Amino acid sequence: MDHASEQRRVKVHELLAEGTSAKLQRFRTSDALDVLKRAYDLATKEPKLPRPIPQLAAYRYAQLRLRSNPQDEEELKKIDELFAYAARATSLNAFTGYRLSIASGECRRSMRSF
């Protein structure tokens, strides 16, 4: 990995840690979403960082978006695309249960109850 890519990898790691920390604090979900999106964007910009870094960033971002009460079908589709991308890393295949939840309509049913 060249020097610039290594610097990006370190920055993505820092953003993932910051976003994960923020999501655990009350009233910081919006901040956490912004930070995790930045991590995802940085990890997936060309040239993409090596696996599983972009997939981990996609997973963390998708997970928090899903937990933040998606408002419509389009948002659920985008979240599912992030989980699909994350599942490309064999080390993250265990997280495909989120995709099953979206596909089964479980999320859509829970959205209607709000």
Image (cartoon, rainbow, N blue to C red):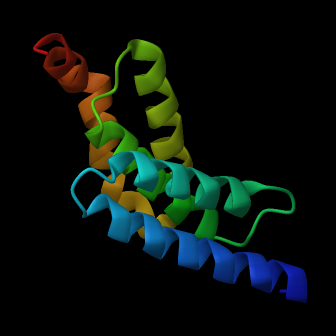
Where is residue 93? Give x, y as percent.
Answer: 40, 59
Residue 33 vertical placement versus 15 (above, below): above
Counting the numbered discs, the total is 0
Residue at image position (88%, 88%) is 3
Residue that extends furthest to the front in the rendered view of this protein: 27
Residue that appears at 32% across and 59% down: 23
Residue 26 on image: x %, y %:
21, 56
Question: In the visual, does 49 lie left or right of 99?
Answer: right
Instruction: Say whether residue 56 is left or right of residue 106.
Output: right
Q: Position of residue 38 (x, y in %)?
A: 62, 55
Q: Residue furthest top?
A: 112
**Quadrant in which the N terminus is drawn:** bottom right
Residue name at image x 52 percent, y 49 percent? 34
Q: Is residue 96 depicted above or below 80 in this figure? A: below
Residue in the foreground of this view, choosing between 38 and 60? 38
Along the viewing direction, whichever of 48 and 27 lies nearer the viewer: 27
In which quadrant of the rendered view does residue 54 lie?
bottom right
Q: Position of residue 44 (x, y in %)?
A: 72, 56
Quadrant in which the C terminus is drawn: top left
Is residue 55 shown left or right of residue 91? right
Residue 87: tell me if it is visible: no
Picture residue at 46% right of the left edge, 71% below the top: 18
Q: Is residue 69 visible?
A: yes
